[in-house]
Amino acid sequence: MKRFLAIGAIVMTVAAATVIFVIPAMAHGTTNKTSTHSTTHTTPKPSMFSMEHHRGSGGGDDHSTAFSYSCASSGAVRGNKVIDVTESIANDADSGQAGNYWAFDRVHRSITIWNVGPDQYCAIVNYYDSSFKAVGGQTSPGAGGTLSGEEYGLFSGSARFSITGQLFVSDPAAWPTSGAVNGGATVDYHCDILGNCPGYVSFTAKYFSGTPTVDEPQWGWRYVGKDSGHHPPTAAGVWVNAYTGNSGDILDSDD
């Protein structure tokens, strides 16, 4: 559910869980959720899954993506990086401008968090080498028509978060401070087309506790579609979903 919140500050309460250890830093904390890159016509906005695509300078790794944001202006430097991990996700439900879920995603992303002040953090979540498969009968992401189900393709992008709260690492075995989440094994969200995701795991819930305040000022993803109904596959459009606005669509135009 790449998710997909309203623009502006997002306050989330992380359920109390046994803290295995605390990472001392200039600051502590954040919590949030993401599931798809959801957006609406009036207020395009991804879910945090979404917490949830291109690498930002001073943030993320060197995978190539469509958008690039940075924590450098917030004071991020190599010495105050506290979290630097990668995560693979399967069966995430992706939402579009009409408010419906239109595709299932397979995601590869990096999560990098810097301590930039007392209880202040900046995070860059970059999505790379990620793919989507449309669901027939659903409204297309750009709300331009009905999907045939033959649409598929790749997407990438990025999101920047400002977080105020306390940093805790409650599950270091599965969610370490560096390396691969879940030992490199894919996290399966088990989403359905209504956006119910029983396997969803929030990275902020794993790295923060208390009642952190999360703001997502920048985010954007670019999808490139193909039509599997042709051999070889033909183009099925490009959809851009970003805080600066949406454009294009993913749609099998010959149906």
Image (cartoon, rainbow, N blue to C red):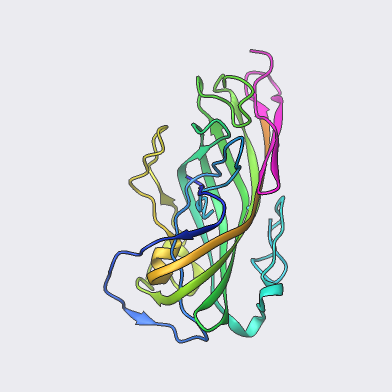
Q: How many labels were placed on the picture?
A: 0
Measuring from the top left, give residue 184's x and y in whole percent.
Answer: 47, 61
- Quick one: 57 or 234, which is closer to the camera? 57
Side of 4 relative to 242 (left or right)? left
Magenta stretch: residue 240 in it?
yes
Name the quarter where the C terminus is drawn.
Answer: top right
Residue visible at 57% across and 59% down in the picture? 216
Q: Is residue 20 above or below residue 235?
A: below
Magenta stretch: residue 58 in it?
no
- Report the span colored magenta: 226-255
Q: Is residue 92 visible from the viewing direction of this image?
A: yes
Measuring from the top left, give residue 28's x and y in whole percent.
Answer: 46, 79
Q: Is residue 67 above or below residue 81?
A: above
- Quick one: 142 or 126, which is closer to the camera? 142
Residue visible at 61% across and 26% down in the picture? 143
Residue visible at 40% across and 61% down in the picture? 12
